[in-house]
Amino acid sequence: MGVKRIAVIIEEIGQSYQSAILSGIAAGAAEFDLNIAAFVSFSGEMNNPRHEIGELNIFSLTDFTCFDGAILLTNTLSCQKAVNDIIEKIKLAGIPTVSIDKDIPCFYHIGIDNKTAMRSITEHMINTHGYRDFAYISGPPENSESSDRLAAFCSVLGENGLDISEEAIYYGDFRAPSGKAAVEHFIEYLPNMPRAIICANDVMAAAAITALRAHGLRVPDDVAVTGFDNTYNSHNYQVELTSVERPLTMSGRLACKLLNEHFKGIPQQRNVILNMSARFTESCGCCHNVLSDVTTLKELNFRNYSNFESVQSYMAVLNRMSTQLEACNNFNDYIATLKRNAVEIHPDEFYFCLCDNWDSELALDRSTAKNGAEPGIPTTYTEEVTVPIAYVNGEFMDCGRIKSKDIFPAAAKTGETGKFYFVTPLHFGERCLGYMAIRSSRIPLQNIMFETFCINICNSLENLRKLMCLEYAVDRLVNLYTKDTFSGIYNRNGFVQATEDIYRKCMEKQRDIMLMFIDLDGLKIINDTYGHDIGDRAICNIADVLRDSCTGGEIFCRFGGDEFIVFGADYTEQMAQQLTERIEANIARINSSGENPFVLSASLGCTIAKPKKGEDIFYFVTEADNVMYAEKRKKKQSRHLKKL
């Protein structure tokens, strides 16, 4: 059957809900010999629309036709358009898909009975504790789980003759800041604080408890609080939280099992509803605290200290990486520095993939801008990407270029099964730079530390890009100042800069210099006869002649109009004669090629002298010019032009 590749779509993996499900998926992948690529965005809490565009763009990288199946946690995504696009792409790919918690027609579904679970919590608060005054902290109204839980809560209140005002329902986003904001909202808009606050998940409940205590309110003495999901052991809240225990880890493993049995042709039930149970403890007033046991408290203290120590260690690694990357001033230095840091976090595999246009100033095709992005900024992944870093089982590999839809280079095909990768975007704002893929690391990947790791790399890469663009812009400005934009050779400014140090040393040590003045013959006749485009070609021909003739380190420029000058140090009369002969030979070669409708001709004059103090280089330009005009007067005044 071969190893099956499964794409996982998820956002905000640092949350306990997502982390528990991912742990189950990882266990299922190992059990059923599946390889997982989890496409991850961190777009929920930044309050930066441009950042969100860049994060959500990772889902456009996923070519589901390259995968055998998919597992979706679309209820974690903050952008409905992204969800719709993902669902449409999966349907077109025709691969078996499991949706966890959100029931999507045509896909397998693993969920829970949210309404029954919330009913049990609410009924307990009314019937057991006698609470009659409630507030509710909800998830997003468009989230099906959120709306089911709120509907069940309101239904129980109605059955018990209780009302709730609009101000007593706060719509959050399942994240901690929502819990704090909800408490502040209730304090400001409700005449009195409610006796109980029911929360749609544990994370918002924990933040609400912290906010209540900051206002001098005790839980549960002044305000009782309940959560949902039972992720208490992951967070160690200030009071043991009444919640709904749900098998999150089991959901992840079961998703892998459903796909594995589908691949084997075993008929599957499309809709699987898992059992759950309410857990009534300290925060609702039941005062059943499992942490009262001395042994458990010791274990908790040890775990808290271990977590603190780990955070300190990881932050030191991340801070060191950030400062080292910020100090890089060229691409090779940046990649070498990132390689050193990649080794330090000990991944099993690490791939750093850059779009072809990652270092561009602006995209050439303005039609690529989307989703409100600034026109001209590349916001899509290029068809191919370069892989400057590929680290596999302790060794760096040379992977060159790959197709972006393949995600991983050939080096990733190690024959192992049960592999679990996180694939995250490289971007700055909406600008798409590339992506990273990482498998296993000492930095916890289902943790806020991993988000910090990703942000640090993105920011440092953008700083490098801007530095490279700035250097490029400076080079362009220098070229505009020193180069003749028409012929591509030095202009007068460039000539002065290029000869300044050499001329000064020749003056100090009384070394000979040579100045040659060259004037294109008959440019006005060429322009009048054939037009200025052909006249321009004649000027460029002389520039090409000088490139081919000045092979001994001479410095030359277009002095202006149809005039050119050449400078050479430590020159002799014989060297000047040889240079003149090379120039004349190259002019003859152009004429013999028949490429022009005119005969290319130029008058030359040169001077050789030891420069004295007070004589600048233009003194010798004038001397050479006078010699050139003397030679020009000897020539016939008529020009023999070829017929068209």
Image (spheres, rainbow, N blue to C red):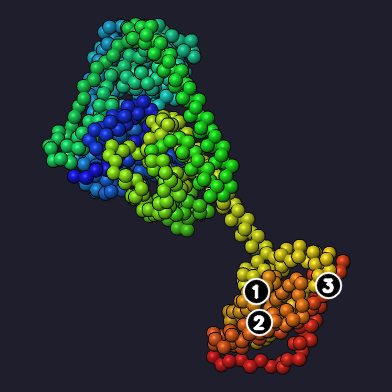
Question: In the shown orientation, is residue 57 left or right of residue 160?
Answer: right
Q: Nearer the viewer, residue 547 or 135?
A: 547
- Position of residue 167 relative to residue 515, above or below, is above
Asked which quadrant contains residue 571, the reply is bottom right
Query: Label 2 to label 1, Cα distance in Å?
Result: 10 Å
* Residue 451 drawn at (x, y percent): 44, 34
- Residue 380 appears in view: no
Question: In the shown orientation, is residue 143 left or right of residue 620?
Answer: left
Question: In the shown orientation, is residue 629 left or right of residue 125?
Answer: right
Disc 1 is placed on an element classified as: loop
Q: Residue at x 44, y 21 (%)?
A: 307
First reached walking from the N terminus: tag 3 or tag 2:
2
Count residues near mark 1 (Cα–Cα under 10 Å), then give few for <14, some for 14-19, many for 20+: few
Q: Residue at x 55, y 47 (%)?
A: 333
Q: Nearer the viewer, residue 129 or 492?
A: 492
- Quadrant for the N terminus in the image: top left
Disc 3 is placed on an element classified as: loop
Asked which quadrant contains residue 129, the reply is top left
Q: Amino acid at mark 3?
A: Lys
Q: Amino acid at mark 2?
A: Arg
- Quadrant for the C terminus in the image: bottom right
Disc 2 is placed on an element classified as: helix
Badge 1 is on which residue? 551
Residue 610 shows which numbered tag?
3
Query: Label 3 to label 2, Cα distance in Å?
Result: 24 Å
Residue 582 shows which numbered tag?
2
* Residue 139 drawn at (x, y percent): 35, 26
Q: Residue at x 73, y 79 (%)?
A: 575
